[in-house]
Amino acid sequence: MGIGSSLVEIIGPALESIEPIIPGDYFPHFFTMELFQRSLIAAFLITIVASALGSFLLIRNLALIGDGLAHVSFGGIAVAIVLGATAPLWYALVFSMVAAILIHEMQNRDVLTGDASIAIFLTGMLAFGLVVLRICGGGITTDVEGYLFGNLLLIDDASLDLIVYITIFSLTTMYFIHSALLATAIDPLAAQVQGIPVRGIGLLFSMITAAVVVSMVQLVGALLVTALLVTPAATAQLIANNFKYCQIWTQIFGLSSVILGLFYSAELGTGTGSMIALVAFFIFALALPSSIFYLFVVSLSVVSRIVSRENEGLASTLDPVGAIRWRVPSSDTTSFFADSLGVTSYGCFGSAGVSAH
């Protein structure tokens, strides 16, 4: 018995106990049938680790690497299907790991700048997978569509075992390198001066990303990985003012997207990946107006302070003594705006707002 099956036996009774309070005609089956219990547990594990990873991807400007590695993993899945392998995710993991290392080295050595290397691997490996399946694998079958757009029924015991291993490895590793990841993301040069292995940390992070992306393929599909990997973190960025709260809100938005996505996909008979992606987008869309309103209020506050300062300057020409009495102690522009806003940061991913607390 694998670790995934053991986990189902442990958590299964708890899921069955809450089934009576679960709404819907079809969604409650996720809490009673072993097949769906396995899928539900896998979905929660994937969401937790993907949300933890997403915040770091944004502060390192690597939002697209998840999408690129997901397409690379599809190439590995295509090879596995053609060869008749029983565990396609292992092939996907090998392909994604190799691609992650190559992309990291190409960017680190300035062979290609920006996201060019990601774009090349993304298009090349997706095309490779489609051509291999068309020539040798019988084309795009139902199972292949499941890997492209997500299908919980593809999560068997072997897949759940791999997802559990990836979750344990990723969360444990990120726990120990958490501070180093933040330091290398904020100021790589300063981190290197402090003795932090910047290149090694970046390579390890790329490998973690590759593993997490592979674990997500069966839940949301290779084409929609970014929806769960980046969108919840981007939504958290709109409302949180430091990195700690960004991570917390990312978990909340990620789990909400998955739970609501699974509910509506079960009740409406749609694909799980597309519905999870749509829910994540709607949550982002709901958070966006509040962020815009906050920025509007902040802008008015700054403008009012600037106007107030200008009025004081005008008053100084008429009443020098009064101007001295009301003059604010000199400070640099940054502290002035910070005092005007009454905050010490401009968002969880701003240069002044990243905090490890």
Image (spheres, rainbow, N blue to C red):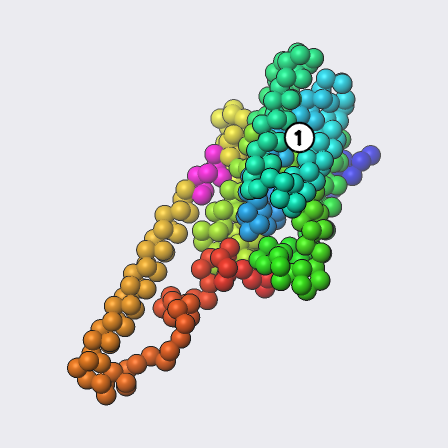
Q: Residue 116 appears at what percent x and percent y?
A: 56, 36
The residue under the point 66% across, 16% down is 133
Could you classify mark 1 by the number of other residues whose Cα lies within 10 Å: few (under 14), some (14-19), or many (20 or more)? many
- Viewer-closest of 275 and 100: 100
Q: Amino acid at mark 1?
A: Ser
State the predominant SS element of the stretch in magenta.
helix
Q: Visible in this render: residue 311?
A: yes
Which residue of the protein is positioned furthest toward the bottom in this rendering? 321
Judge from the rendering whether residue 175 lies leftward or rightward of residue 255; answer left or right.
Answer: right
Look at 57% across and 44% down and name the residue there. Answer: 62
Q: Secondary structure at mark 1?
A: helix
How far across and how far down the image is residue 153, in percent?
Answer: 65, 26
Look at the image and give the residue range highlighted in magenta: 278-284
Q: Relative to residue 49, is residue 184 depicted above or below?
A: below
Q: Nearer the viewer, residue 318 or 169?
A: 318
- Point out the image quarter for the N terminus: top right
Name the residue tied to disc 1: 73
Left/right placement of residue 191 relative to residue 284 reads right
Image label count = 1
**Percent position of residue 331, x then y:** 40, 75
**Residue nearest the observer in this picture, 188 or 147:** 188
Which residue is rendered at x = 55% and y = 42% of the image? 114
Q: Position of residue 86 (x, y in %)?
A: 76, 23
Inspect the magenta stretch and tell me whether residue 84 lies in it: no
**Relative horizontal placement of residue 315, taking residue 6 as reference (left or right):** left
Furthest residue toward left: 318
Above or below for 291 versus 309: above
User: Quick check: is 282 in the magenta stretch?
Assistant: yes
**Position of 90 relative to 290 (above/below):** above
